[in-house]
Image: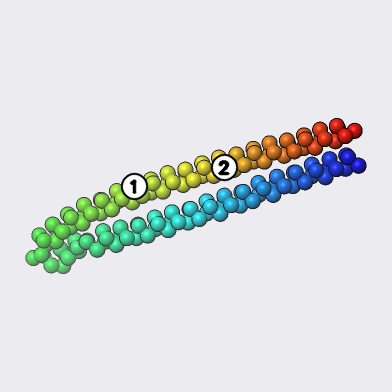
Amino acid sequence: MSYLYLFFETITVILASVVLVVVVAEVVVVVVVVVVVVVVVVVVVVVIVVGEISGGESSSSSCFSNSSSCSTSSSSSSSSSSSSSTSNVVVVVLVVVVVIVLVVVVVVVVVVVVLVVVLVAVVAVVVIVVAVVVVVVQQ
């Protein structure tokens, strides 16, 4: 009878450990997906806004159609090119920040999953060893 108890105790601990690891993995996947979606949406919005700002100041095409205002157009064109380079720098910095955030999130998620799996394995082994000791002592 005690060996049957030990068998069921072991199966219960293993199933509980598997369920716990699966639940933690699902929560981690949901958190990672939410973070990635939010970061991608923010990047897209910022790129669109920066593109609208730099695109709105561009007036180099008016130089070809109206030659009398070409001098004023060229000065505004130089300001729009500096604005365009600024917007390019903003986009590059934003992409670098997004990549760093994603790498940090992935590293944290991997560390948390590994720690949870190790903790569950240690607890399962301890419970199984205690059950074996109890069965052996009762014999």
Closer-to-camera residue (38/122) = 122
Quarter of the image that includes the C terminus: top right
Q: Is residue 124 above or below residue 25?
A: above
State the residue at coordinates (26%, 58%).
54
User: Tag 1 or tag 2, which sits nearer the N-term?
Assistant: 1
Residue holding disc 1: 93
47 vs 36, left or right, is left
Q: Secondary structure at mark 2?
A: helix
53 vs 66, left or right, is right
State the residue at coordinates (55%, 40%).
111
Q: In the rendering, at what x and y percent does residue 20 appear?
A: 67, 48
Q: Residues within 10 Å of mark 2 (few under 14, many from 20)?
A: some
Q: Nearer the viewer, mark 2 or mark 1?
A: 2
Closer-to-camera residue (78/42) = 42
7 vs 54, left or right, is right
Residue holding disc 2: 112
State the residue at coordinates (38%, 45%).
96
Closer-to-camera residue (60/32) = 32
Q: Is residue 30 above or below residue 131?
A: below
Distance Cα–Cα, label 2 vs label 1? 28 Å
Q: How many marks?
A: 2
Quarter of the image that includes the N terminus: top right
Q: Residues within 10 Å of mark 1 (few under 14, many from 20)?
A: few
Tell whether label 1 touches label 2 (CB within 8 Å).
no
State the residue at coordinates (70%, 46%).
18
Q: In the rendering, at what x and y percent does residue 110 appear?
A: 56, 42
Q: Amino acid at mark 2?
A: Val
Picture quarter containing residue 30? bottom right
Q: In the rendering, at what x and y percent does residue 89 appear?
A: 29, 48
Q: Amino acid at mark 1?
A: Val
